[in-house]
Image (cartoon, rainbow, N blue to C red):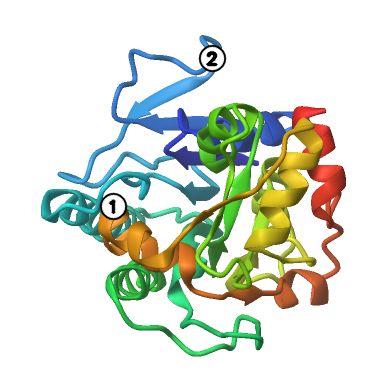
């Protein structure tokens, strides 16, 4: 199958390319800077939010492009987060609408930020939509994806992705290695996560399994409380974790992003499990051992 991947040079995009090649697929990489080829042997095309991309020949499309949410949520940052996701997905849907031979499936990135703070409740794909900036962004993002005129549209609601280089874990490691890892707020909030390899495998699963459509939680089946995550990461690195970052301080420093870190989201991959997807790293300890030894 020929798969077009937007955001192909990103943290998740590169993993998807690797797994697609391992499974025998041909990949067309879409990026804002085609001159920075992911692989000289791979076809690379231009992607931006200004015009629909050239998806000709693509039998499936994976849409991952978007402004990273990490960093201070200034008004300009919020605008980039919203516009990159909404406008970028709209352009993909417009490109598909104009095609005579349309892709069979679109797998579009989304986020668990769609959900409201669930406390101790388990959040499956049928859980209610939340409020606030990220929930609104994600709802509009998914709405644009749903407009794509393909047989199937998968909306991959992604949790915190843990990988060797980059992503959330890459941002955490310097502090934890220095013994400065912290428990955020009460630490009792549930924290959904997924190993990068399982995330990439789930993307390919959503393409290849003809019965998969609609929202799909990209989260390991064993979420963990934030304090448990911090302590497990500390144990893996042989470093103590004794610091606490109070909620008010996080909100003062990180602004709106702090709410996403402090809300409790016990997200479960109900749809993936029902369709028979097998996680290679369902629990945190083996996942961290694989990633950082």
Q: Which residue is mark 2?
A: 39
Towards the viewer: 2 or 288: 288
Q: Nearer the viewer, mark 2 or mark 1?
A: 1
Q: Is residue 93 visible?
A: no
Residue 79 spot, x, y in % from top left: 16, 55
Q: Is residue 263 above or below residue 202?
A: below
Residue in the picture at 82% in, 62% down: 277
Find out whether the residues at labels 2 and 1 contact each other: C-beta distance under 8 Å.
no
**Residue 181 vs residue 257, the one in the foreground:** 181
Looking at the picture, tell me which residue is in the foreground, 203 or 287.
287
Tell me the CA gap for discs 2 and 1.
Answer: 39 Å
* Residue drawn at (31%, 54%) of the image: 254
Choose top left, top right, bottom left or bottom right for residue 183.
bottom right
Q: Quadrant of the C terminus?
A: top right
Residue drawn where x is 80% and y is 44% of the image = 287
Residue beneath disc 1? 253
Residue found farthest to the top: 40
Q: Residue furthest left?
A: 75
Give the SS element for disc 1: helix
Mark 2 Cα-neighbour bin, 10 Å: few <14, some 14–19, many ≥20: few
In terms of sequence position, does the residue under pointer 2 or pointer 1 come before the other?
Answer: 2
x%, y% of residue 216?
62, 70
């Amino acid at each position: 199958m020929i798969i077009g991947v937007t955001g192909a040079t990103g943290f998740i995009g590169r993993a998807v390319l690797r797994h697609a090649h391992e499974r025998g697929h041909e990949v067309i990489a879409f990026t804002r800077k085609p001159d920075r080829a992911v692989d000289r042997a791979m076809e690379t095309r231009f992607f931006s939010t200004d015009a629909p991309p050239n998806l000709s020949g693509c039998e499936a499309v994976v849409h991952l492009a978007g402004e990273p949410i990490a960093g201070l949520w200034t008004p300009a940052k919020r605008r980039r987060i919203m516009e990159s996701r909404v406008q970028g997905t709209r352009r993909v849907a417009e490109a598909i609408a104009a095609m005579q031979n349309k892709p069979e499936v679109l797998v579009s990135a989304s986020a668990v930020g769609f959900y409201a703070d669930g406390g101790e409740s388990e959040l499956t794909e049928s859980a209610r939509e939340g409020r606030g900036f990220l929930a609104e962004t994600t709802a509009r993002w998914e709405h644009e994806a749903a407009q794509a005129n393909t047989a199937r549209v998968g909306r991959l609601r992604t949790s915190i992705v843990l990988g060797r280089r980059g992503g959330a874990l890459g941002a955490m490691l310097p502090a934890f290695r220095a013994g400065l890892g912290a428990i955020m707020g009460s630490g009792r909030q549930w924290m959904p996560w997924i190993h990068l390899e399982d995330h990439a495998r789930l993307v390919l699963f959503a393409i290849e399994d003809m019965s998969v459509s609609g929202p799909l939680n990209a989260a390991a089946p064993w979420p963990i409380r934030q304090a448990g995550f911090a302590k497990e990461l500390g144990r893996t690195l042989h470093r103590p974790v004794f610091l606490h970052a109070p909620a008010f301080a996080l909100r003062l420093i990180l602004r709106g992003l702090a709410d996403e870190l402090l809300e409790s989201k016990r997200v479960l991959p109900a749809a993936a499990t029902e369709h028979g997807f097998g996680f290679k790293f369902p629990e945190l300890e083996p996942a961290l051992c694989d990633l950082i030894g």
